Structures are given as structure tokens and as C-alpha cells.
Image: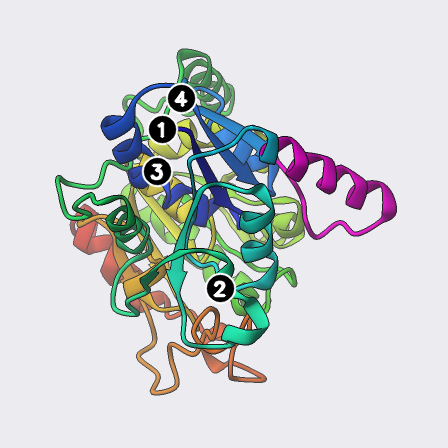
Amino acid sequence: MKILLISLKGLGDTVYMIPLIRRLREKYGGEPMTLVVRDRKCVELFANCPYIRPVLIDYKKTDAASLLGHLRTVLALRRENFDVSITSFPSNRLVYNLFAFFAGAKKRITHYYAFARWRTLPFLQDCRVDSDRRKHQVEKNLDLLSCLGLDPAEGAPDMSLWLAPPDEDYALAFLREKGIEPRTDLVIGVHPSISGAQVYKNWAPGNIDVFAALIDWLAAEYEAKVLVFCGPDEKEAADSIIALTKSRPVAVDRAETNKIATMLKSCRLFINTDGGLGPLAAAAGSTTITVLGPTSPAVTAPYGKNNTALTLGLDCAPCYMYPYESTSPAIKCKAPACMGIIDIDMLKKAVRGHLGPGKA
């Protein structure tokens, strides 16, 4: 069977496709599957996977040259005559349904959402599976297998990544250069998503002090070597956090996705706010503690039993509206209180739950 997979979202959402991809490969084997993504980090995620051919298309670029490139990509995909296309969760957008339709697979599969049916044209896809609000993204994606006559619940979801020796060598060399020996040192990763990139992940700058205090506590209480992960739009905040610390953690601010994944794999614990590195860390085998604001832990928190999701327990949360009440990322609160507070005592309690009492 010739399969087209569509994940026009970010890194975390694409990581949550991995169990679906592995099940499809197990069932159908054969030629590589084509996966359309809009982020180069997602292309890098599958660099070592022998049965995924990533295709990059940044549909948000709308200049004339980009639009012409998008058209060429869609026409090239259409000429491949796919038997089936599968658009992963969340997919309640007009552009996703149009893309799947014009790519022209004989059978087109996605989720069903009751909201904005006439604006997003979901009927352009001919098999739609109910998107249960109570299920995690991983399970929602596996539910799409039912359109192929397969049992979504068969076997445990396999989240494992495709990491290669060069990725492992890079991480080991990087850490040793910074004076960290991952085989003997207790390595803890921290990813504070403090940026203006996305309203529902834009943790308040006041939390910089909290993260700095947490890092120094980890270094003192557990003699941990701490890595601070950050993307380009988070680097200023990460630098500010590091400048406030006494223990001087190591910044990890650039590398290909699988190299980042191997550094995450070296972390005994990974503490993060809502972002793509949490799912990646869990898939790499690290235990995660994730602080969530408007999004639902049941749906978006890193997948797996060893991971902890923390919320403030506010009555208004979760209030993230996409894809059930909006067709784009949006929250109900104009000034969400949950994004201004990270409870350091709650974080310390969660850390102790995974690492024990430390020196105290």
C-alpha cells in the first residue's frame, strides 16, 4: 500500500505520530511512506528512519515564489497516486483538508470535529474518526487505523526514535567538552518556554527567577549537572536564567533534532513547560516533568507512565480551544493567570518523587 502521511504541525505533534507510523510499517511493510511536514526539525526527526521519506512544505509562507513551490509539491504528490492519506491530530483547519484533497489519495483519513464544519470542509476527506477529547494525541492518531480495518488498541504504542551512532557521538562529545560525564554524572535538562511565539506557551518573564532558583536547587540538592535547552526565540530568556544562577548550567541552543534527542536521552530527568522537547525527551527515554497552562494534560503531556504533568488546578483550565472550539491556536483568557505562576515547591516535590529526597 502506498501511504501519504500529513503532519503540518510542530515537532511535538509529529513525535506523537511515531506509534502510528510504526504500526503502519508493521502491517504494510513495502516501500517507504511519504510524510509531509512544515518544520525542518520534523524532517530531521526522520533522518535515520529507513521507511519514511519526509517532504517539507511551509504552507504559512504565502509569497509568490513560495505559493508556486507549494503548488509544485502538491502536484508532485498527486502524480504518485497514493492509496491512502492520513492527516494526524489536530487537523481542524481548511488548509489541511484542502491539502489532503488535492494530493489526491484514493482514501483520505482524518479526525472528525463538530466545530466549524462548513469553514474547514472536512467532507473533502472520506473517512473521519471521532476525536475523543479524553484521549491522548498518541491514542487519537492510532484511532485512525480503524479506517483501514485495523485495531487501534493492538499492542503497546512504540514511541522509540531512530537515533544513530553519529548522533550519540555528537552528544557525548558536547557534554564532555562542557565537563559533564553522562555515564556517571546526574544530568538534568530544563526547558523554559518563555517567548512571545505562541500565546498559550508564552510563560511570563517573571518565571525566569523561578527557573534560576530551581536550577541552583538541583545543583545543590542533587549535585546535578543541568542543561538549559532553548530554541532561537527562547535564547534571550535562557541566557537571563543562566546569568541569575550560581551553578552556571550549560546552554543547549542549537543542533539537529536527533542530536538534541541524544542529549535529552542523557538526562535522568527533563523539566519543561509546554513545548516540542517534552514529547521528544519522553520518546528518547528520559523521565519528564511538564508544567502545563491552558492545554490539557490528558491530551498533550509527554506520553508514558514515567512522566509527570503539573497544573495549578485552576477552575478555568484547560482553556486551549483548538481544535474543538477554534480553527487556530487560541485560548479563552486574555491574560491567563496560569502562565504567570510556576510553583517552585510543586516542582521540587515532583523532582523528589522521581529522584528521592536528595541531601535534605
SS class, disc 4: loop
Of the two numbered discs 2 and 4 on the same chain, state the one appearing first in sequence. 4
Q: Nearer the viewer, mark 3 or mark 1?
A: 1
Q: Is residue 19 rendered magenta in the image?
A: no
Residue for badge 1: 1
What is the C-alpha distance between the residues marked 3 and 1? 18 Å
Kindly identify which residue carries mark 4.
51
Magenta-highlighted residues: 56-77
**In front of the other: label 2 or label 3?**
2
Whether 65 is among the magenta residues is: yes
- Give how far apart the Cα atoms at labels 4 and 3 are: 12 Å
Q: Earlier in the sequence, mark 1 or mark 4?
A: 1
The first of marks 2 and 3 along the sequence is 3
**To which residue does mark 3 refer?**
18
Q: Of marks 3 and 1, which one's residue comes earlier in the chain? A: 1
Label 2 sits on what residue type? Pro
**At 36% across and 53% down in the image, what residue appears?**
217
Q: Are marks 1 and 2 in contact (CB under 8 Å)?
A: no
Specify the amino acid type for callout 3: Ile
Residue drawn at x 31%, y 28% is 185
Q: Dots 1 and 4: beta carbons under 8 Å?
A: no
Q: Secondary structure at mark 3?
A: helix
C-alpha span from label 1 to label 2? 24 Å
What's the distance in space between the residues labelled 1 and 4, CA to CA? Answer: 13 Å
- Is residue 53 left or right of 154 when viewed as pictured? right
Q: Residue furthest right?
A: 64
Is residue 188 visible in the rendered image? The answer is no
Secondary structure type for disc 1: loop
Q: Which residue is mark 2?
A: 122
Neighbourhood count class around disc 3 (C-alpha, 10 Å): few under 14, some 14–19, many 20 upward: many
